[in-house]
Image (cartoon, rainbow, N blue to C red):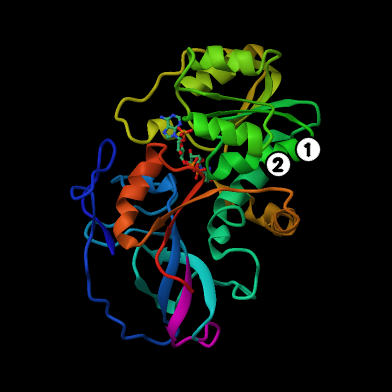
Amino acid sequence: SAVFLKYPTEFPVIGEHIEVQTKELNVELKDKDVLLRNLYFSLDPYMRGRMRNAKSYVPGFQIGEPMSGYGIAEVKESKNDAYPVGTIVSGFTGWQEYSVVPGASGLRVLHGARESPIPLSAHLGVLGMPGMTAYSSLKIIGQPKAGETIFVSAAAGAVGQLVGQMAKKLGLRVVGSAGSDDKVDYLINELKFDAAFNYKKNGTILENLKRAAPEGIDIYYENVGGETLEAALEVMKNHGRVIACGMISQYNTQQPYGIRNLHHVVSKRITIRGFIVSDFAEECSADFAKDVGSWLVNKEIIYREDVAEGIDASPEAFIGMLQGKNFGKAVVKIADL
Ligand code: NDP
């Protein structure tokens, strides 16, 4: 298991805050319990928020206990008729090779997963929580219209790469920012963004954004916060919308960034709206599964994953994702099906 050791104040450190330990699992199943053989688990920025000793929308990690999150697994032993041995499930699992899920709580059966051409790990990315995040918030908060310009930050990541492609399908001009030249190449050449820049190079973020979006932007898909948000407010057109999805530049620091130009919100009549993906589950789940499922099968959207192999690699992959070393959706592969 990858075990949580201590609350970090900045970037977590292996051995101090997270550590892989060998633990014996108590596999005495009670009625309705299942034992899972974990195949994949997801590494997500929100997990950094679970490393705080504070109340949030997801319960924090427990010190001395395995980290947890969305995963894909095979039922290995079962005392629950709804989840027979061999069933492939997705749900909240541990950063563990095996985990017991009391009452099979929250597990969803992935019907036909063994035969499907869609890789299992896609259920953690494009067809999972990040995909739903992109799809629902772009539609509901962004209110995108053909001909408008959208700027997406962390654009080569799990959520960003999907937002950009979905916006292109709707006829928007799409501008992205990312933290390396390879990521920028991917945005332009593979995802067909209209413009993209490396926010670490060629002047300030504002200068880069002005070059990429000389006419201004109508929608800002906010993944990073800080200086990027400030630049987006500066170039935002009247009646612009900010889809406040995340602010990852603020997750590993004790010194919050003070946005200096919030006054634009008034004069430009900007709407800034935050959300948590579960807010839109009822309204969007069915359309999401239908639309994104068919776009994927028809290769109308593509995606990139960054796969770390084995539980031992998980702490480094997690910290690397927070630092931008991932290229695409960060997942850990634990075992083959
Ligand atoms: P990504 O796959 O995009 O990985 C995180 C990326 O953030 C890194 O690869 C890195 O890319 C970028 N990053 C890290 N530090 C900084 C920094 N200081 N400045 C700018 N960019 C930085 O993760 P996700 O797609 O899963 O998540 C993207 C955002 O969406 C996060 O803010 C997350 O919290 C949020 N989110 C919110 C949800 C909600 O319900 N509201 C649900 C899911 C995600 P780069 O190389 O470009 O720097």
- Which label number is shown at residue 166? 2
**Is residue 51 rendered to the left or right of residue 144?**
left
- Which label number is shown at residue 170? 1
The answer to whether 165 is drawn above or below residue 294 in the figure is above
Q: x, y percentage for residue 183?
A: 53, 34
**Residue in the picture at 28% in, 57% down:** 62
**Residue in the picture at 32% in, 45% down:** 54
Q: Give the extent of the magenta segment.
A: 72-84
State yes or no: discs 2 and 1 in contact (Cβ < 8 Å).
yes
Q: x, y percentage for residue 97?
A: 35, 70
**Residue in the picture at 67% in, 14% down:** 268
Q: Is residue 26 visible?
A: yes
Dot 1, crowdedness within 10 Å: few (<14), some or many (≥20)? some
Q: What element does badge 2 sit on?
A: helix
Quadrant in the picture for residue 312 = bottom left
Kindly identify the amino acid type of the residue bearing the numbered disc 2.
Met
Q: x, y percentage for residue 118?
A: 63, 64
Q: x, y percentage for residue 158?
A: 54, 45
Kindly identify the amino acid type of the residue bearing the numbered disc 1.
Leu
Residue at disc 2, CB closer than 8 Å to ligand 1: no
**Is residue 224 rendered to the left or right of residue 275?**
left
Q: Is residue 223 visible?
A: no
Who is closer to the viewer here, 189 or 17?
Answer: 189
